[in-house]
Amino acid sequence: MTKELRCGDLMPGCPAVLEGRDETEVMTKAAEHARTQHNIQEVTPDLASKVRAAIHDKP
Ligand SMILES: [Zn+2]
């Protein structure tokens, strides 16, 4: 099942949608996206749990 994360759910106004084969892949892409697009250098455990909660199956 493909997983998807709409960055806008966490970062209002961001149009990025990140996809992966599983949650781990989406998390990896999200960390990269956060670093390059939102200047978030470190994904804290608190942020990681929010990201994980926002990941859902792609319809
Ligand atoms: Zn974003």
Image (spheres, grey):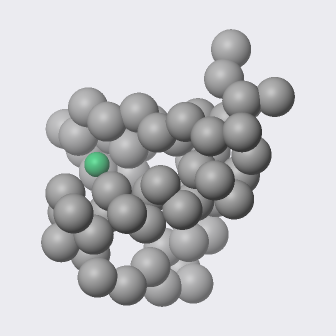
Report the label total.
Answer: 0
Q: Answer yes or no: is residue 19 visible.
A: yes
54 left or right, relative to 30: right
Q: Is residue 27 above or below residue 55?
A: below
Q: Is residue 16 above or below residue 30?
A: above
Relative placement, left or right, of 56 versus 4 is right
Residue that lies at the very extreme toward the top in this rendered image: 59
Q: Residue at x 31, y 36 (%)?
A: 16
User: In this view of the protein, can residue 56 be seen by the observer?
Assistant: no
Which quadrant holds the N terminus?
Answer: top right
Residue 58 at what x, y percent from top left? 66, 23
In the rendered image, the residue lying farthest to the right is: 1
Describe residue 2's horizontal placement relative to residue 19 as left or right.
right
* Viewer-proximal residue among 32 and 15: 32
Q: Quadrant of the C terminus?
A: top right
Q: Residue at x 44, y 79 (%)?
A: 43
Q: Position of residue 53 (x, y in %)?
A: 64, 54
- Foreground: 47 or 25? 25
Taking the image as shown, residue 21 lies to the left or right of residue 26, namely right
The residue that appears at 19% across and 38% down in the rendered structure is: 13
Q: Position of residue 45 (x, y in %)?
A: 57, 84
User: Does 32 sit above or below residue 44?
Assistant: above
Q: Position of residue 47 (x, y in %)?
A: 48, 73
Work out whether residue 16 or residue 20 is closer to the camera in this orientation and state it.
20
| Residue 37 figure quarter | bottom left
